[in-house]
Amino acid sequence: MPTLDFAVERQRMLAHIVTQAVCLTLRLGKAALDGRVLRALERVPRHEFLPPELRALAYADTALPADCGKTVSQPLIVALMSDLLGLQPGDRVLEIGTGMGYQTAVLAELGCEVCSVERIPALSRGAAERLEALGYEDRVELRIGDGRLGWPEQAPFDAIIATAAAEQVPPALVGQLRPGGRLVMPLGPPDAQQLVLGIKGIGRDAQGVVGALSWRVVLPVRFSLLEGE
């Protein structure tokens, strides 16, 4: 079998994402995905975040099996979730669910300081090794723990992203998001999950609640469940 040119495959993946994202971004009132997000995906070698036997499929636009019964998210969804966060260089981001570290690397490529929490020790250790080998260790800090509790010692965060689904937003995450910050995560029961964007208010809402989240439903998704200790 001929050796794959991962750089070429990655360009094909990006072209596919640009095409597929058109309808999604129009629904969000945008013309296209942020070019910085696309460049971040271009720089991150997704094949390095997959088991060796799956690397030939690394740049297919699909979720793929990973260690410990988890998955590496579909590139289009990674791009969309990263875009929804509205990140700027230097932003502090909390990631819930490090997994294999692929989304973590994309956030780091966007110039963010990433604090990432993973419940499964083996996954966190493996992600740490990959991220260090690829030179991301100065922009990423990892922790093993219950993602529902966030990372209070590092709060507040400019943005929070969860790569696992819950039926309701964990209150700790809302408390650790700065006013005006964005939270992107899948919500809902396993058979009816929706990717949502929440923006934290900077004052009181109509009901007098300080720092309430205003929500926008983006699209149906299917993620593994956000589990605790």
Image (tube, helix red, strand yellow):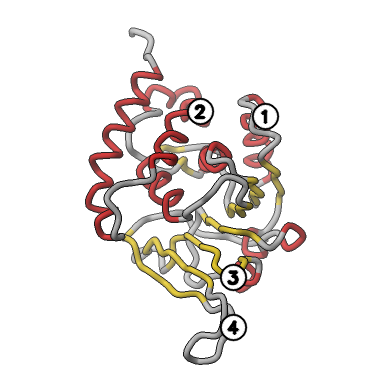
Q: List the residue tagged with mark 4.
A: 210
Of labels 4 and 1, the one closer to you: 4
Of labels 4 and 2, the one closer to you: 4
Q: Residue 129, image x and y in percent?
A: 67, 30
- Cα–Cα gap, marks 4 and 3: 9 Å
Going 26% across and 35% down the picture, which residue do you hit? Answer: 16
Query: Are there few (<14), some (14-19), or many (20+) residues within 10 Å of tag 1?
Result: few
Query: Which quadrant of the figure contains the C terminus?
Result: bottom right
Q: Is residue 150 above or below residue 63?
A: below
- Cα–Cα gap, marks 2 and 3: 39 Å
Residue extending farthest top: 2
Query: CB under 8 Å between callouts 4 and 1?
Result: no
- Looking at marks 2 and 1 on the same chain, the residue that comes earlier in the sequence is marked by 2
Inspect the image, locate mark 1, and give the three-letter code of the amino acid beneath it: Glu
Q: List the residue tagged with mark 2.
A: 51
Q: Is residue 3 above or below residue 157?
A: above
Q: List the residue tagged with mark 3.
A: 179
Inspect the image, locate mark 2, and give the three-letter code of the amino acid beneath it: Pro
- Cα–Cα gap, marks 4 and 2: 45 Å
- Looking at marks 4 and 2 on the same chain, the residue that comes earlier in the sequence is marked by 2
Between 225 and 219, the residue placed more toward the observer is 219
156 left or right, relative to 201: right
Q: Residue 158, image x and y in percent?
A: 60, 59
